Every structure is written in structure tokens, then in C-alpha cells.
Image (cartoon, helix red, strand yellow):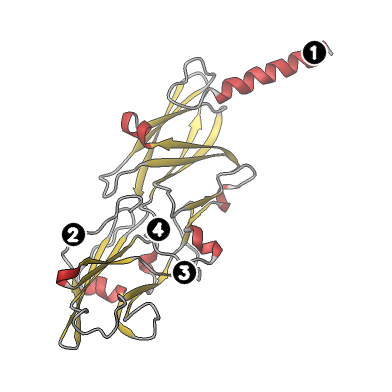
Amino acid sequence: MKSKKSLIVFMALWMGLLQSCIGDTLKGCPYETILYFRFPDLLTPITKVNIGIYDEHGLFVQSIEVQQQNLETSKKIYLSLQPGNYTAVCWGNSLENTLIKGFEYGAHLSDGAVMNPNYKSGGIIQTNDPLYYGKVAFTVVPNITNEVDVHFTAAYDVISVRIEGYEAQKKTTKQPMIRIDHLDPICDFNKVTNDGRDASYYPFIWDSKPDNETYLSAVLPLNTSLVNNIAVNVYADDTANKILCTIDLNTFIRENNINVDDNKETIISILVHFMNGQVAVSLDNWSEVPIEPGV
């Protein structure tokens, strides 16, 4: 009975120690591992990082969320892990337009995915968050400080559409609507998407300069999407009864010599200009595209 009580006390102390060994310092912890966040030149600031840790069998061990105030003072996180082999998966800027699956007990690394929350619910998808991705395998060796670098890459692109001159010829008080077909709403923890799971996005559109008859819209798709046959459709209004033009995005990228890099943000800016009943599509050099988290 005494030995049983001693074991319970020991386990309680051990669990308390482990819980106190995740954070800004590991003073007094049994094994020390430091993950350093290595961010590239960022188009969008990273305001939050979600981390999932998996063991050598791919089983979920723990998750940590690092908030903006911690990232501003120290781009690293301290962990206490038993000796062995691990994998860390990190997603930066997982905000209101991102759902992470696989950061829960019982999950396997191969089951992990990030997606737009409306993909499963069937709601309208407007955009994704400006996600950044990092993944690293590492080994925890006892009795030393294990230092691990996590290098982040962009996991999103930017597609912006500016519409000019439409006010002069439209016959409705409604604003135009944009639908972008064949974007990827979901990818796994290797930043790979499965064929056949694309979706249509309906990005928010606003009258940005009423005097200049200008409408602007932007969407941040996962950057696995640009290999798809993406179509950008501009409709007269939200009834989608009249289509004004359709842009084959692959052709647009090729004809305008836009460089696509899987590890960086590709910015595709499209100008749709109406004049005298005709429509012209060209590369837009306008830079006022909001891509800050939460915008």
C-alpha cells in the first residue's frame, strides 16, 4: 500500500514537472529541446504559430500555440521530450479561415490536414489565411540541450482581381461577383493535396474607388492550387445568371511570365477593364491588395 502511494506521488510530481517544462524556459527540466523558428522574408507578418509534435511512430504527442507577443520577443519554444525521434509540424497564421486536423490525442501524422472550415460544413468559401508552413524531423538526446531549426515556407498565394469601367455599362444596381473554380481547400502535413477535392471560392468584393468605378477582390488560396486548371469567372451580379468573362489562370500566368515558386508567395494581379462594350484582361500593377491576417 505504501509503495502504491509512493508511485502515485511520484507520477503526480512527474506530470507537474512536464507541464511546467513547455514555454520560455526549461530550467530544472529533465531533457531540453529548443525549436527555433526560421522565418523567410515575409509578405505577411506571422502573428501565431501552432505546433504539433509526433513520435517516431507518427503518433501525436502534444501541441503548442505560440502567440504574437512571444514571437515578437523570442522566435523559439522550449520543450521537454523523452529521448527519441520526433517530427514537428508548424503552421503560422492559422486564424479564422483555417482548421487544423491532427493536433489531438490519438491522431497520426499521416491523418493531419489543414483546410478552410467551410470545406466540411458546406458554407461559402471566401479565402484562406496567409499560412506559413514548417516541418522538421529531429532526435532528442539525453543530458544535452537539443537545438532544432524549423524553416518556414509560404503555404499560400495571392490572386487579386480589379474591375474597372463596369459601372458605365451595367444595368443593375448590384455589384459584380467573382467565382474562382478549382482551388484546393485542403492539404496534408506535407503540403500536398489530393486530386478531385477542389472547390469554388467566392472572394469578398468591394467598391474600392466609387469615383473611378473600381471594384477590388482578393483571395489567398493554398499554394498547392496553381497546378490546377483554375478559372476566374466574373459575373454581372450575385445571381450568376450572366457571365462577363472567364480567365484561364494557367494561360494568364504563362502569357505574363509570372514565376511560380512552391516555397514563396506568388502574387497574381488581374485587371479586368470594360470599355465600349468590350472587356480586356491584363496584368495589374496595382499594389493595394490587403493580405494582412484578419483583413
**Residue visible at 42% across and 24% down in the picture:** 24
* Looking at the image, residue 61 lies above or below residue 43: above
Identify the amino acid type marked 1.
Answer: Ser
Q: Quadrant of residue 279?
A: bottom left
Q: Tell me which label, 2 or 3, sits earlier in the chain.
A: 3
Q: Nearer the viewer, residue 261 or 286?
A: 286
Q: Tell me which label, 3 or 4, sits earlier in the chain.
A: 4
Foreground label between 1 and 2: 2
CA separation, marks 1 and 3?
A: 59 Å
**Residue visible at 40% across and 58% down in the picture:** 128
Identify the amino acid type marked 4.
Answer: Asn
Q: Tell me which label, 1 or 3, sits earlier in the chain.
A: 1
CA separation, marks 2 and 3?
A: 28 Å
CA separation, marks 1 and 2?
A: 70 Å
Of the 4 image quadrants, the one containing the N terminus is top right
On the image, the x and y values in percent for residue 92 come to 39, 45
The number of callouts visible is 4
Crowding around mark 1 (Cα neighbors within 10 Å: few <14, some 14 to 19, many 20+) is few
Q: Are marks 2 and 3 in contact (CB under 8 Å)?
A: no
- Determine the secondary structure under disc 1: helix
Crowding around mark 2 (Cα neighbors within 10 Å: few <14, some 14 to 19, many 20+) is few
Q: According to the image, label 2 marks what residue?
A: 287
Foreground label between 2 and 3: 2
Crowding around mark 3 (Cα neighbors within 10 Å: few <14, some 14 to 19, many 20+) is some
Q: According to the image, label 4 marks what residue?
A: 128
CA separation, marks 4 and 2?
A: 20 Å
Any mark on residue 3, and which?
1
Identify the amino acid type marked 2.
Answer: Ser
Q: Tell me which label, 4 or 2, sits earlier in the chain.
A: 4
Q: Are marks 3 and 4 in contact (CB under 8 Å)?
A: no
Q: According to the image, label 3 marks what residue?
A: 198
On the image, the x and y values in percent for residue 237 come to 34, 79
